[in-house]
Image (cartoon, helix red, strand yellow):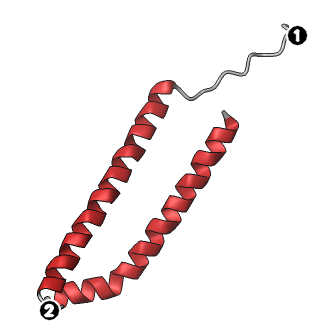
Amino acid sequence: MNDEPAENLSTVGSGRVDALFDEIELTVELLDRFGDELESVRRRVEANDGETSGHVKNRVEQDADQLGEEAEEAVEKLQERLDALKRTV
């Protein structure tokens, strides 16, 4: 039996880290585009003096707050996990 301590090698390959970070970057870009698209919708509604279909109004009134809160929570969780990963490596 070998009494030397086993070398502690990471089981995470650089390929997986690259893929994960690429996915995160794409998601951030997508979220940014969603923000731009939402601004475009807001401007069109504003240009129409706030008039819009009942479906649009209901969707915005019912889901905007919840989506914003969920996005904020996801961003906070992502930031916490990125910070923890940085401290670990």
- Label 2, on which residue? 51
User: Which structural element holds mark 1?
Assistant: loop
How far across and down, in percent of the image, does residue 58 sit? Answer: 25, 89
- As drawn, the residue found furthest toward the top would be 2
81 or 33, which is in the foreground?
A: 33
Dot 2 alpha-carbon crowd within 10 angstroms: few under 14, some 14 to 19, many 20 or more: few
- Image mark count: 2
User: What residue appears at the point 36 percent right and 51 percent down from the top-left corner?
Assistant: 27
- Label 1, on which residue? 3
Amino acid type of the residue tagged 1 in the rendering? Asp
User: What residue appears at the point 69 percent right and 37 percent down from the top-left corner?
Assistant: 88
How far across and down, in percent of the image, does residue 57 sit? Answer: 23, 88
As measured in the structure, the alpha-carbon distance from the residue carrying label 1 to the one carrying label 2 is: 77 Å
Residues at discs 1 and 2 in contact (Cβ within 8 Å): no
Query: Is tag 1's residue or tag 2's residue first in the polypeptide sequence?
Result: 1
Camera-near label (1 vs 2) is 2
Q: Is residue 36 above or below residue 30?
A: below
Q: Is residue 41 above or below residue 50?
A: above
User: What residue appears at the point 74 percent right and 16 percent down from the top-left corner?
Assistant: 7
User: Which structural element holds mark 2?
Assistant: loop
